Every structure is written in C-alpha cells, then in structure tokens.
Image: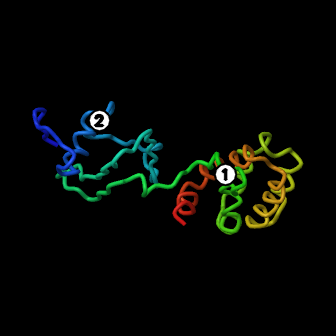
C-alpha cells in the first residue's frame, strides 16, 4: 500500500485509493496479523474478528509463509455480515438454540460435555441426572430442550456458549444456514 502522503484524494477519485487512505489513518492498521492455534496440533476451524466500525470494508488475505503467494482473499463489507449476537431491539425473536433445535437434537454428539458446563449454572442436580439417564444423544438433547422451555435468554445463552465450546464446527455450520 505505498500511498504518498502528498497525494490528495477528492470525492471523485478511485474508491480503492480512498479506502487505502482511510485504512492508513485508522487507529489500528496492521500489515500482518499472526494467528495462533488454541492448542498446538489441534485444528482451528474458525477465527473471530470483532470490528467497531467497518467503514468501507476489510480486505482479508491468507498468504503462504514459504513464498508469500495469496492462497485466499476476501473483501468483507458491512452488508456481507450478519450479527452473531442476539438482537436487542427484537426481544420476541427466537434465540439461536431455539431456532436450531432440530439440528442440535440430531447433531450434538458430546451431550455430556455440554451438560457438565450447564450443571449447577442452569441445570439442577435432578435435571442433570435426568438428561444423562437418557439412552441416546438425541434423547438427551430432547430432554435438555424440555427443560429449556422455562429458561430466560441468559440461560439459553449459557447453553449456546457451552455448545460453541464443545461443538464449534457445528455452531459455525448452523450460522452459515
């Protein structure tokens, strides 16, 4: 991005040049961002970026460490994104776990790990044991959802976070739907 500091940019000039200028004058400008795996040897299925003001977009590139060739590139604009957080202005909208109940019942495989994260926080000892007593994972998830009918959004958010920690690939896939 070799941009001369004496070059003036007017409203009619190339948008790409204006975008580059805006990026250079932003409080945080990174040429390279090194991402680390949570645990060495384990695949990292996704990475999250939080941006306060997206402006005209963010260009993302993945380059080969060997020869610096671009192996993947994308321009992310605000219209391309969907909110990962529940909408505050729409309290009647369904929570993520309610929207995806059918898929979660069918696809969650580590139900006991989810239960362990909810035990004592959202689930009583009796509820925890009732769910664990079910013979199959889908039956366990159905029983868990039977208790969730009385939960508020905060409890459902705890379930979402437990699922996100134990099944990140599934949650990512459901957000893509």
Mark closer to the observer (2, 1): 1
Q: Residue at x 60, y 51 (%)?
A: 164
Residue 126 is situated, as x and y percent measured from the top left of the image, at 89, 48
Q: Which mark is residue 18?
A: none
**Where is the N terminus found, in terms of image quarters?**
top left
Q: Nearer the viewer, residue 38 or 174?
A: 174
Q: Which of the two labelled residues, at mark 2 and mark 1, occupies the earlier sequence position?
A: 2
Element assignment for label 1: loop
Question: Pointer 2: what residue?
Answer: 29
CA gap between label 2 and label 1 equals: 34 Å
Determine the image quadrant of residue 19: top left
Residue 47 is situated, as x and y percent measured from the top left of the image, at 44, 49
Q: Residue at x 75, y 45 (%)?
A: 155
Q: Nearer the viewer, residue 74 or 33?
A: 74
Q: Which mark is residue 90?
A: 1
Residue 161 is situated, as x and y percent measured from the top left of the image, at 64, 47
Determine the image quadrant of residue 70: bottom left
Q: As drawn, is 45 to the left or to the right of 103?
A: left
Element assignment for label 2: loop
**Where is the C terminus found, in terms of image quarters?**
bottom right
Q: Residue at x 37, y 42 (%)?
A: 35
Q: Residue at x 23, y 49 (%)?
A: 65
Mark 1 is surrounded, within 10 Å at the Cα level, by few (under 14), some (14 to 19) or many (20 or more) other residues, namely few
From what the image shows, is residue 11 above or below residue 104? above
């Amino acid at each position: 991005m070799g941009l001369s500091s004496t070059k003036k940019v007017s409203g009619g000039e190339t948008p790409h040049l204006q975008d580059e200028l805006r990026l250079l004058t932003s409080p945080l400008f990174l040429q390279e961002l090194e991402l680390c795996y949570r645990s060495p040897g384990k695949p990292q299925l996704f990475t999250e970026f939080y941006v306060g003001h997206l402006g005209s977009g963010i260009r993302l590139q993945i380059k080969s460490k060997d020869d610096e060739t671009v192996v993947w590139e994308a321009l992310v604009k605000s219209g391309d994104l969907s909110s990962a957080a529940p909408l505050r202005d729409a309290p009647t909208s369904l929570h993520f776990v309610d929207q995806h109940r059918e898929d979660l019942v069918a696809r969650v495989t580590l139900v006991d790990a989810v239960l362990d994260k909810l035990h004592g926080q959202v689930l009583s000892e009796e509820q925890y044991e009732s769910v664990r007593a079910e013979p199959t994972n889908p039956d366990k998830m159905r029983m868990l959802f039977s208790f969730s009918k009385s939960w508020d959004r905060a409890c459902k958010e705890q379930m979402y976070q437990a699922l996100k920690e134990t099944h990140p690939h599934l949650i990512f896939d459901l957000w893509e739907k």
